[in-house]
Amino acid sequence: MNILRSRFSASANAENGTSNTSLRGYKRATVGLRQIFLAGVAGLLLGNTATVMAQDDSNVGELPLDELRTFADVFNQIRVGYVEEIDDSTLLEYAIKGMLSSLDPHSAYLERDAYENLQTSTSGEFSGLGLEVGMENGFLKVISPIDGSPATDAGIQSGDVILKLDGVTIRGLSLNKAVEKMRGPKGSEIVVSIGRPGEQEPFDVTLVRDTIRVASVRERWLEPGFGYLRISQFQQKTGDDVKASIEKLLAEQPLKGLVLDLRNNPGGVLGASVDVAGLFMESGDVVYTEGRLNNAAQNYGAAAGDITDGAPLVVLINRGSASASEIVAGALQDHARGVVMGTQSFGKGSVQTVLPISDSRAVKLTTARYFTPNGRSIQAEGIKPDIIVERAKVETFDESGRVSEKDLAGHLDNTTTQEAVEAEASKGLISRDNQLYEALILLKGINIINPRAPQALPKGQQTAAVKDSSGES
């Protein structure tokens, strides 16, 4: 490549001397430059292709020389005639970016900042607004806001479209450039123009950038015996964090049922999704992938042993549940291990492989599609819930004025307070989160019809479980 650059420099000096005098001179210069460029590019590509063909002759065809000539023509026309001078390496990088961005919304050329951002996002901490986004029709579409982020606090929702950043339109920017504009120092402000389905006019939201520490797993009790586990993103250690959270719940009291909340979870590390699904399965396939490369065909199975001993499970998903979230929901649905509830998921059924090309740059390339154990492709379709429950605002009627037995003078007292305790624990849940409320009701119904002896950790393991579960969650 260094040799190619030096040849371009020599040709550039010659053509610059003639391009201002006549169109004929301009054409002669560009033809000569095209020949040099085509020879150099063909040599480089033939050299690289020979290496690839040595690995797998069946996957590589002959180089399209006519298209390479067209590429050389376009490259030279830009280099000679564009209103501003652009160096060769920059133009070649533009070509690489355009080639990758034209493949699909998820393939990209990662320069230093984007590469570092990708690495930090899987580790669980980065600086920005807390948005998982994708490019659609030239604009940024919000896949999901990250829990506890400035975006969540400002009310940005899955499905929102980002039209402008600080008054500058997004249209025409690459995904990486748009994400780069959203990042910045902690405490700095940015005005985000939002278009929302159902709203007639766009509106502006002022966000203050912050350090986003993604606690990928949180757990709590909804009512005695009924647990809640929230996974906001699949990071490298999410499988271990989920295991620790479940052990913490089991150490506190027996588990009658569990809600696994994957709503607005944009996905993340594939291996983490396999680990999480495996925690709820005795055995079996979780996901398999298919692609053109030899190593793209992979089958991922669950490790033996359901940590909850088959406790009833409801998995919550919505349009913001993507990728690794869909792998977990699809696997548990195919194995009839849990009831999937909510709304249809995002539909990202492809696998991206990060291929480093230097210490600071990499290519993120879509290399495979993934399928659920029963062979379902999720790409552009998503996971369909077993029970559809739309997010809604629910108001309950106030019946506090009605007279009941306990209001009568001389009534007998109730000797148990358990029902009152359970009612108080879930009070207001139906108005705060109707989907979660319906999941809880379903778990309670399953326990009524099919009572089970709930599992608890052996006493000797309880102390260790509580200790292991401390941390971000």
Image (cartoon, helix red, strand yellow):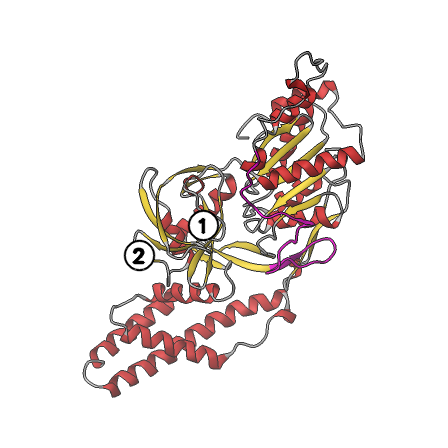
**Visible residue check, residue 300:** no
Q: Check disc 2 and report the residue beneath it.
A: 168
The residues tagged by marks 2 and 1 sit, at their Cα atoms, a distance apart of 24 Å
Q: In which image quadrant can residue 396 be found?
A: top right
Q: Check disc 1 and report the residue beneath it.
A: 115
The label number, if any, that marks residue 234 in the structure image: none
> What amino acid is labelled 1 in the image?
Tyr
Residue 315 vs residue 131, the one in the foreground: 315
Q: Is residue 195 above or below residue 1?
A: above
Residue 340, percent across and down? 68, 46
Badge 2 density bin: few <14, some 14–19, many ≥20, Cα 10 Å: few
Please give the name of the residue rendered at 76% of the width and 27% of the height, measured from the top-left corner.
455
Query: Which residue sits furthest bottom?
Result: 24
Badge 1 density bin: few <14, some 14–19, many ≥20, Cα 10 Å: many
Residue 74 vs residue 408, the one in the foreground: 408
Q: In which image quadrant can residue 35 be found?
A: bottom left
For numbered disc 2, what is the local secondary structure? strand
Q: Quadrant of the N terminus?
A: bottom left
Residue 253 vs residue 26, the one in the foreground: 253
Residue 317 vs residue 7, the one in the foreground: 317
**Visible residue check, residue 183:** yes
Please give the name of the residue rendered at 60% of the width and 71% of the height, measured from the top-left corner.
60
Residue 392 included in the magenta stretch of the image: yes
Q: Is residue 366 above or below residue 406?
A: below
Q: Main SS of the magenta segment?
A: loop
Please give the name of the residue rendered at 34% of the width and 78% of the height, measured from the top-left corner.
33
Q: Which residues are magenta?
A: 368-397
- Relative placement, left or right, of 211 versus 355 is left
Residue 465, percent across and down? 66, 24
Of the residues tagged 2 and 1, which is closer to the observer? 2
> What amino acid is labelled 2 in the image?
Val
Q: Is residue 106 above or below residue 430?
A: below
